[in-house]
Amino acid sequence: MKVPEALTASYRRTDWGRAWLAALPDQATDVLGRWELRVDGPAGNGMASLVLPVVRADGTPAVLKLHPVTEDNAAAPIGLRTWDGDGVVRLLDHEPGVMLLERLDASRPLSSVADDGAAMRVLADLLARLVAVPAPAGVRRLADIASAMLDQVPGAEPALRSPADRALLRTCASAVAEVVGEPGDRLLHWDLHHDNVLAAEREPWLAIDPEPLAGDPGFDLLPALDGRWDAVVGTGDVPRAVLRRFDLLTDTLALDRRRAAAWTLGRVLQNALWDVEDGETALNPEQVAIADTLLERRT
């Protein structure tokens, strides 16, 4: 089995990543044997996982996904079992670092749909279905994540070169502080964007790759808002296009817009903190545009 170069490049920079890569062929062989799976095509990869098309002993096509267990993905089987295929890929079997999943059409992500309005309606409808479900025990809580973010802001702020970026970081933190006391209890996908929705046979479109979180649905909107950014820019009016997307999402999910805006600013804050941790000294321009638009709407 040849591990895709893109996946190798993602993990070979760290000792633990190189160790996972070294063990991966033997792990795959072991799981294939124990679960009576036959490889049915070349290996692929997601952002952080090896993906093997396989066929089960009964002839059912499936996908075997192998990945390092992280804090973000450890609860994926819990979320997938809870949703039980409703708007999301179905989990067939799992063990730590391994999931056997319903096979979808990886050649047809939602990002391949040219009509941005139609694609956004698909995202909105899927999100509405997913967040309608109460979060089960065993998934991370937005309450804890939001509190930790607020604690990190003073240390992160000096890393940003621009006074405007530093001011926006503080403003996003203030928005989170307004809502942190009511963090919500819905089961969130946490990463539902155009490339995490694939065409399927069971339904036209299904979500993949959740990182389950218990919280307010407003915290789940940003990946849909900044996905396919070229379509936003192509309208010639970025604020209007952002608000059109935001209003579609909040209407479909039946969310209070002011509260949803606050949690979306919280997601901008989270990404900013991650960027600073990675050595960035400026905020992402796309997310600055979204934050500025929502702040203008809030006032």
Image (cartoon, helix red, strand yellow):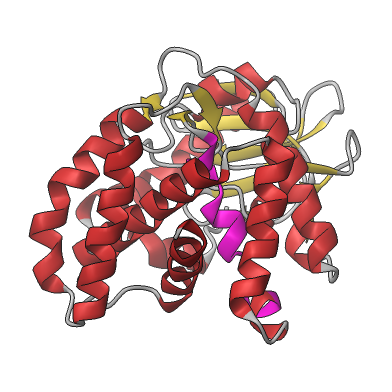
**Can residue 45 be seen in the rendering of this structure?**
no
Q: Residue furthest top?
A: 137
User: Horizontally, is 209 left or right of 234 in the view?
Assistant: left
Q: In x, y percent, where is residue 298?
A: 47, 57
Which residue occupies 31% across, 34% down? 180
Q: Is residue 254 left or right of residue 121?
A: left
Depicted 255 relative to depicted 187: above or below: below
Quadrant location, the C terminus: bottom left
- Relative to residue 42, is residue 214 drawn left or right? left
Point 15% across, 50% down: residue: 152
Q: Is residue 218 magenta?
A: yes
Q: How many marks?
A: 0
Hey, which quadrant is residue 236 in on the image?
A: bottom right
User: Is the stretch drawn in magenta largely helix, strand or loop?
Assistant: helix
| Residue range (magenta) | 217-231
User: Which one is nearer the viewer's eye here, 73 or 123?
Assistant: 123
Residue 279 drawn at (x, y percent): 20, 71
> Vertical placement of 188 versus 158: above or below?
above
Residue 227 at x, y = what percent?
Answer: 61, 64
Q: Residue at x 54, y 49 (%)?
A: 50
Q: Position of residue 46 (x, y in %)?
A: 56, 54
Residue 72 is a magenta residue: no
Q: Give residue 263's quadrant in the image.
A: top left
